[in-house]
Image (cartoon, rainbow, N blue to C red):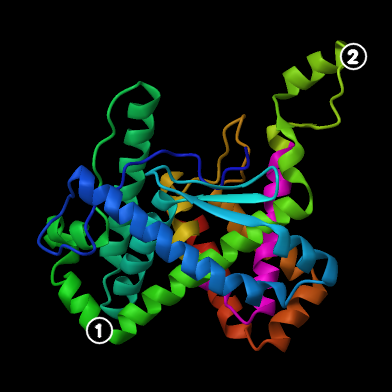
C-alpha cells in the first residue's frame, strides 16, 4: 500500500457550526460527504491543468486514471492498482483545518496558535492510532474553528465569523487547499508512472527468505527502497507544481501535518516506508540545489522568492525542538 499518511484519526469539528466544537456522528458523516464532493470538484479542476505540463505519454496515462474519495476519518492517500488513486475524506478535512490555522497565523500574527494546534492534532492522531490498534473507539479531535474556541490562551480573538469576514485570510486558505491537492495529485501520479503500486512491501529479512525459497522477489520492495520511491514522487510533484506556476510552499498544510505527527524529528523507525517529513523538505532542497535544470525552471517561472521561503521554512523545521 502506498500511503501518504498511515495514521488513523477521527477528526470531528464543525466548520459550519461556529458555536459547536465537536459534532454528532450524523454531522460527522455529512461533513465527510461534503469534503468528498468538494474534493471531487477540485480534483476535476486540477487534472486538466496538470496534464498540460506532462509529455504525451504521461498525459495519456493521467487521462486513464480514476480518483476515488472514501468516506472515512482515516487520513490516507495512495496509488492503487488498476489505475486508481484513493484519497480519504479525513485527509481532505485535515488539509482544510491545517490551511485554516496556517492562514490565520499569518493574517492575524498568531504563530503560537499554529504551533499549539500542530501539537494538538498530532497528539490526537497518535492517540487515536493507538486506540484503533487496540480495538477501542477513537476520540473526537477539534478542527480549526473548534480548536480556537477551546484554546483562548493561544488563539484568543480568532473565530469562524471573523476569519470568514477576512477575504484575504479565506482566499489564502483556499489557495493552500488547492495547492496541497496539486501536490498530492503529482505525488501519487509519480507512483502510477513508475508502477510503484505493483510492488509488495516486505522486510529485508522476508525478501531474503523468499529468495532462499526460490520465489520471485523482483516485485518485492523493502521499506528503505520504498523511501527512495517516495522521495522520487515528492521531487516529481514539486517540479510539476513549479511548471504549473504554483509555489511548493502552498502545499504546506499536508506536509506540516506530517512534521507535527512525527514530533518534528528527522529520525526514522527501522521499518519506516516514508522519509521523515523534516527530511523530505531538506532532501528535496539539497537535491534541487544541485539540479541546474530545476533551478532554471524556478527562475523561468519567477519563483526565486517563493523558493527561498520554502528553503528557509525547511531549515526552520530542521532546527525546531
Q: Residue at x 32, y 78 (%)?
A: 170
Q: Can residue 65 be seen in this view?
A: yes
Q: Is residue 321 visible?
A: no
First in sequence, mark 2 or 1: give its number: 1
Q: What element carries label 1?
A: loop
> Which residues make up the magenta segment?
225-251
Q: Where 273 falls versus 211 (above or below)?
A: below
The quadrant holding residue 148 is bottom left
Q: Where 162 falls versus 204 (above or below)?
A: below
Q: Residue at x 40, y 47 (%)?
A: 71
Q: Which residue is drawn at 25% across and 84% down?
A: 166
Marks 2,1: beta carbons within 8 A: no
Q: How many marks overall?
A: 2
Q: Mark 2 points at which residue?
A: 214
The quadrant holding residue 302 is bottom right
Circle 1 residues within 10 Å: few <14, some 14–19, many ≥20: few
> Is residue 248 magenta-colored?
yes
Q: How far apart are marks 2 and 1 (CA)?
A: 64 Å
Q: Mark 1 points at which residue?
A: 166
Q: Which residue is drawn at 62% across and 30% down?
A: 270
Q: Main secondary structure of the magenta part?
A: helix
Amino acid at each position: 500500500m502506498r500511503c501518504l499518511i498511515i495514521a488513523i484519526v477521527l477528526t470531528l469539528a464543525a466548520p459550519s457550526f461556529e458555536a459547536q466544537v465537536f459534532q454528532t456522528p450524523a454531522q460527522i458523516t455529512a461533513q465527510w460527504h461534503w469534503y468528498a464532493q468538494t474534493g471531487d470538484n477540485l480534483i476535476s479542476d486540477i487534472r486538466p491543468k496538470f496534464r498540460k505540463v506532462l509529455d504525451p505519454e504521461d498525459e495519456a496515462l493521467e487521462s486513464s486514471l480514476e480518483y476515488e474519495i472514501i468516506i472515512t476519518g482515516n487520513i490516507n492517500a495512495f496509488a492503487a492498482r488498476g489505475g486508481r488513486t484513493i484519497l480519504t475524506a479525513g485527509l481532505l478535512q485535515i488539509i482544510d483545518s491545517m490551511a485554516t490555522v496556517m492562514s490565520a497565523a499569518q493574517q492575524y500574527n498568531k504563530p503560537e496558535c499554529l504551533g499549539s494546534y500542530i501539537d494538538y492534532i498530532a497528539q490526537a492522531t497518535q492517540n487515536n492510532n493507538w486506540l484503533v490498534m487496540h480495538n477501542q473507539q477513537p476520540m473526537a479531535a477539534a478542527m480549526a474553528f473548534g480548536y480556537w474556541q477551546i484554546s483562548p490562551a493561544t488563539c484568543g480573538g480568532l473565530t469562524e465569523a471573523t476569519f470568514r469576514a477576512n477575504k484575504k485570510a479565506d482566499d489564502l486558505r483556499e489557495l493552500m487547499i488547492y495547492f496541497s491537492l496539486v501536490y498530492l495529485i503529482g505525488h501519487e501520479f509519480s507512483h502510477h508512472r513508475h508502477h510503484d503500486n505493483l510492488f509488495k512491501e516486505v522486510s529485508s529479512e522476508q525478501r531474503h527468505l523468499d529468495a532462499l525459497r526460490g520465489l520471485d522477489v523482483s516485485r518485492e520492495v523493502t521499506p528503505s527502497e520504498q523511501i527512495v520511491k517516495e522521495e522520487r514522487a515528492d521531487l516529481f510533484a514539486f517540479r510539476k507544481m513549479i511548471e504549473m506556476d504554483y509555489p511548493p510552499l502552498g502545499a504546506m498544510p499536508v506536509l506540516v501535518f506530517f512534521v507535527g505527527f512525527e514530533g518534528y524529528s528527522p529520525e526514522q523507525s527501522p521499518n519506516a516506508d516514508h522519509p521523515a517529513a523534516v527530511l523530505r523538505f531538506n532532501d528535496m532542497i539539497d537535491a534541487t540545489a544541485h539540479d541546474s535544470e530545476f533551478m532554471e525552471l524556478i527562475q523561468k517561472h519567477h519563483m526565486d522568492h517563493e523558493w527561498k521561503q520554502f528553503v528557509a521554512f525547511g531549515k526552520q523545521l530542521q532546527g525546531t525542538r
